[in-house]
Amino acid sequence: MISVRDLKLAYGKRVLFEEVNLNFTKGNCYGVIGANGAGKSTFLKILSGEIEPNKGTVEITPGERMAVLKQNQFGFDEVTVLDTVLMGHTRMWAIAKEREALYAKEDFTEEDGIQAGHLEHDYGEMGGYTAESDAATLLSELGVKESFHQSLMKEIPSNLKVRVLLAQALFGNPDILLLDEPTNGLDIETISWLENFLADYENIVLVVSHDRHFLMLSAHMWPMWTGRK
Ligand SMILES: Nc1ncnc2c1ncn2[C@@H]1O[C@H](COP(=O)(O)OP(=O)(O)O)[C@@H](O)[C@H]1O
Ligand SMILES: [Mg+2]
């Protein structure tokens, strides 16, 4: 669950929102709507911790994992398509790297062995052993063919990049999913895939979209955002 209490954000004298009190609960997809400049993106950035509010708090149930659709298409230029998706699960990715570094050590000690045991346990719990094939399946479902999976992000066309970034956000079924204008740059087929994906999604989704058709199909309820009070 995400609990928002008495949230306020202003840029100078311009109050985007204040006294916002909301709970977002499991199993619901919330459509965030409002005019351009109303503060939708800012609101999502506060939820993800990218921006500090002027007032109020955002609390997330401990242990819940949040994933955010990245907006910067060039943020993973030097990373392969498959790794870009895997990096969406930041904790699992960190453990994978820690494991690699540990096993690469020349002087592997007894303590290293114990540490490796802990890492293997956590990695397995998170689904690490099937992560690569899960990521590959998700990519293929989103129309990113296997021949692209080992390409660098900078080498693939931008219509594929948006799908990879979407796969990154969805990878590993995060408890909380924040999607700001996810249909931008997507073809009709992928939008329709995403509608179905979100309609069946059992965790929390917040989606900003101008596309009413998309919202109606994917959001269970959307009586919320009108920007400024
Ligand atoms: N860092 C900032 N400094 C000052 N004003 C900002 C900043 N970021 C956004 N704004 C302004 O806040 C308003 C809300 O922006 P945004 O959240 O991007 O709106 P939306 O996503 O609803 O279109 C806009 O008027 C924008 O110009
Ligand atoms: Mg916006």
Image (cartoon, grey):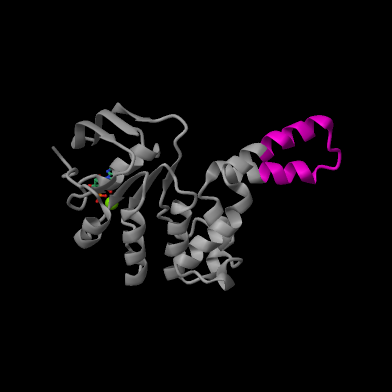
Give the overall secondary structure of the magenta segment. helix
Instruction: Give the side of residue 81 with respect to residue 158, left or right.
Output: right
Report x, y in % for residue 38: 20, 46
In the image, 169 versus 130, the foreground residue is 130
In the image: residue 164, left or right of residue 149: left
In the picture shown, does residue 217 fall above or below 40? below
Above or below, 190 against 105 in this view is: below
Residue shown at 57% from the left, 60% from the top: 82
Q: Does 180 appear above or below 57? A: below
- The residue sitting at 72% across, 35% down in the picture is 117
Q: Residue at x 79, y 35 (%)?
A: 113
Residue visible at 57% across and 70% down in the picture:
146
In the picture, the quarter occupied by the N terminus is: top left
Q: Which residues are magenta?
A: 97-120
Q: Nearer the viewer, residue 226 or 193?
A: 193
Residue 48 appears in the figure: yes
Which percent across, then down, holds residue 53?
A: 31, 32
Q: Nearer the viewer, residue 106 or 12?
A: 106
In the image, residue 116 lies in the stretch drawn in magenta = yes
| Residue 119 drawn at (x, y percent) | 67, 37
Residue 55 within the segment the image draws in magenta: no
Which quarter of the rendering shows the C terminus? Answer: top left
